[in-house]
Image (cartoon, rainbow, N blue to C red):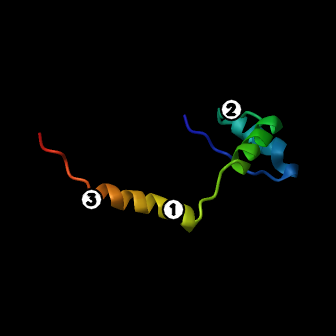
Amino acid sequence: MEKLIINIPSGKIDLVKQILKELGVSSQPYEKSKLRADKNKLKGVSIWTEKDLESFDEAKKSFGGLTPQEW
């Protein structure tokens, strides 16, 4: 089963739901509380600058110079 999200003009919602129901498609309303929660999760995503990423590149270079120790 696949999930499809579509935007329907408000005047056509009942018609589209009726057609989909006749085709055997089930629909679930999207909860507004879930929408708010999703928006809040997206707001919490951090943005990394080039300067932030430089430290990763430096660390990667320093590990490249290491050689395994012989016993």
Seen in the picture, residue 40 relative to 1 is either above or below; the reply is: below
Q: Quadrant of the N terminus?
A: top right
Mark closer to the chain start, 3 or 1: 1
Q: Nearer the viewer, residue 28 or 21?
A: 28
Q: Which residue is mark 1?
A: 53
Mark closer to the chain start, 2 or 1: 2
Q: Which residue is mark 3?
A: 65
Labelled disc at residue 26? 2
Q: Residue at x 76, y 36 (%)?
A: 34
Q: Secondary structure at mark 3?
A: loop
- The amino acid pointed to by label 3 is Gly
Seen in the picture, residue 34 relative to 45 is either above or below; the reply is: above
Residue 51, image quadrant? bottom right
- The amino acid pointed to by label 1 is Leu
Q: CA distance from mark 3 to mark 2?
A: 59 Å
How many residues crowd around disc 1 within 10 Å: few (fewer than 14), some, or many (20 or more)?
few
Relative image position of residue 11 (x, y in whole percent): 88, 50
**Residue 60 falls left or right of residue 25:** left
Q: Residue at x 61, y 40 (%)?
A: 3
Q: Nearer the viewer, residue 11 or 48?
A: 48
Seen in the picture, residue 23 relative to 8 is either above or below; the reply is: above
